[in-house]
Structures are given as C-alpha cells and as structure tokens.
Amino acid sequence: MVANRLSRTLSAFNHSTRTWAPIPLGNAQSQVRQRLSLTSRNLDTWTQKLSLTSWNIDAFSSRPVSRAKHILSHILDGSKSSDIIFLQEVTSDVWASLLDDARVRAAFLATDAKDQTLFEDVPFATMMLLSSGCFASGLDFQKEGDGIEGGGKLLGYVSRMTLPSKYRRDALYVDIIPPTASGTVFRLINVHLDSLGDTLHYRAQQMEILANVLREPRCSGGIIAGDFNAISPEDDGLVDKNELVDAWVALHGTDPDGATWGVGVERRDGLGPGRLDKVAMMGLKVEEMEVLRPGSIEVPRPGDKSVEVPWSDHCGLRCTFTI
C-alpha cells in the first residue's frame, strides 16, 4: 500500500513579531550527528517519560470555539501536565482560536500554524501541540552550548500522510530524535480514522498503513493515538492484528470505564458507550492512562431558555509513556 505524504512544518510563536514562524526542519540523520557532536559525553542509554492527551473536540455541536477553550483549559490547568496534545475535528475557527490562545503561544509548538490548506475540501482537521519546554526545534539546538544538557528531544520531520478514505482523512505525524542514537526516530501519529459502519474496510487499510509507518527503516516505534472510530468487534481486533500494543488494555484490561464515546447519554440509535478513542504503541512502555470526562457549557435557546451541552461527544485520553 502506498500513501502520499505532504511535508509540513512546526511553528513557534515569535513574540517579537507577534506571529507564528515556521521552524526549518532539516535532514533528521544529519541533525542527530550534529547534536551528538556538541557534547563529549557518551551516553549509552536514554529514557524519557512523556505525557500525551488526545481529544476529539466535536466539530458539529453548538459553540465549538467555546467548547474547545474549555477542553484546552482542562488539559492545561489540571494537576497533570501534557507534553503532547493531539486534537481531532478541529474546524478553521477553532484552529484560529487555539493559535491565538496566550497559553499556547507561550508554551507550545504547533503544526500547520501558518497554513490553512489543511481545511481544503474537509470540514475539520487534526492538530498537534508540542511543549516547547520539552522539545527542541532545529534552531534551538544550534543555539545551545551543549545539545544534550541544554535542551529537550530534537524534532524531525512533520508530515501529513493521505490515507485511503471515504472522508479524506489523513495521519499527522512528527518524528522525535533521541539524543543518543544516530539515525533513530520515534513517531507520534495523530489520527481520525474513517467514521461509521460502512467504512470498516477503510479503517483496516488505514491501521495497516500506520503500523507500517512505525516499522519504516530507522524508526524504532512510537504512538498512534486519536479517534479510531472503533465501533465494532472487528475494529477492536485491528490493533492486535497489526501487532501493536493497546495501551488501555495493557494497563486496565477490558475495564468498561475505558469508554470514550456515548458516555452518560441515551442515544436514539440505541448504541451504547464505546471505546472509540485509543492509544496504540510500538517499542514504548505505557505507565499510566486515564479517561478525561468532558464538562458542559450553557447554550442559549429561544424563549430565554438554555441547555447544557457537553464540551464534546467524546471523552479525552491522557497517557503517560516511556521511550
């Protein structure tokens, strides 16, 4: 199977010019060699614990910008921080609002911050935020006196991979370059697989392609996280079929509290709660994982009435893992 890839950039907020500036990302292998040459220390092993939060923020319910702000606050203001944030169903208005948020500008690198082409012919897209305190850009390590002592993991290529899809879905991923292994990367892949029951064959193809991305030369594994739209028993078998580790199952087994969709609501179609959102791993160790329940906001209705609307029809997932 072949999927086209579009090279993207990460962007950091430039406070002096008040704009999101793209970070030039060069060849990953040469960057690692240069980074290693900046230190005389020979580190044989390197481990790092990271925290990822993934959330489908629901593009179609009322007041998407307000709901997205509540979700972001819940992620950022909680007792547990997140080094990596995956978002799905991000509309163009929500995208602009998140990039304008002072907390995001101050502390995160963002994908596609200067390029709205990701919304061409689609109602929403995926987005990734990476802690600038945790991850170093191609420019950061060039400015440091010691590439390992002074900075975080180096970020390599950022790509959107087009997938076989009824709904024009893609996979957004970025490479993390460990400071001690020349030519080795770990991949973070943010996904929103095809929706509904008639697209199972697409989801099966998508999962096979994504698992193979983690097995490409010089890739030592990584994470696939997001909305897997796992609505059937056949979907639940796709992670195992592709020899990946389902992080929730690894820690909690088949605990029903792992449901991320349809939680606490009664649906007209009769569908019950489901674990539609997942974190799948290769070559990493899962440490902790929890489901983040959405709160609600008031939405005005005609006649001086209002209704409570959840931040999203999905719950979020927070996962801590070790590379």
Image (cartoon, rainbow, N blue to C red):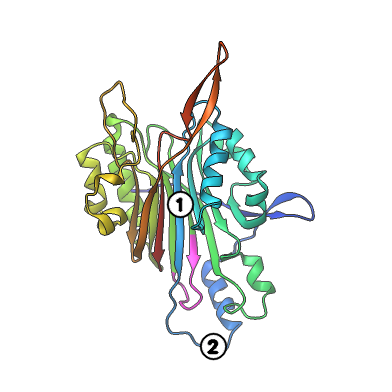
Point out residue 140 in the picture as x, y percentages from the top left corner. 65, 68
**Residue 95 in picture, x, y percent from top left:** 59, 39
Residue 43 vertical placement versus 213 (above, below): below
What is the quadrant of residue 134 in the picture?
bottom right
- On the image, the x and y values in percent for residue 284 come to 35, 65
Residue found at x 43% / y 35%: 168
Q: Which residue is mark 1?
A: 53
Q: Residue at x 56, y 20 (%)?
A: 300
Quarter residue 257 falls in: top left
Tell whether 89 sits left or right of 255.
Answer: right
- 181 in magenta: yes
Tell me where the magenta segment starts and ends, as one range. 175-184
Crowd around label 1: few <14 · some 14–19 · many ≥20 (10 Å): many
Q: Amino acid at mark 2?
A: Arg
Task: Name the kind of residue labelled 1 in the image.
Answer: Thr
Residue 34 screen position, x and y as percent:
59, 77
Q: Quadrant of the C terminus?
A: bottom left
Q: Is residue 322 magenta?
A: no
User: Which residue sits at x=62%, y=76%?
Assistant: 150
- Residue 91 seen in this snapshot: no
Extreme residue toward the right, this view: 16
Pick the front one: 207 or 68: 68
Q: Regarding mark 2 in the picture, which secondary structure is present there?
A: loop
Q: Is residue 233 left or right of residue 288?
A: left
Location of mark 2 (residue): 41
> On the rendered structure, is 162 left or right of 207?
right
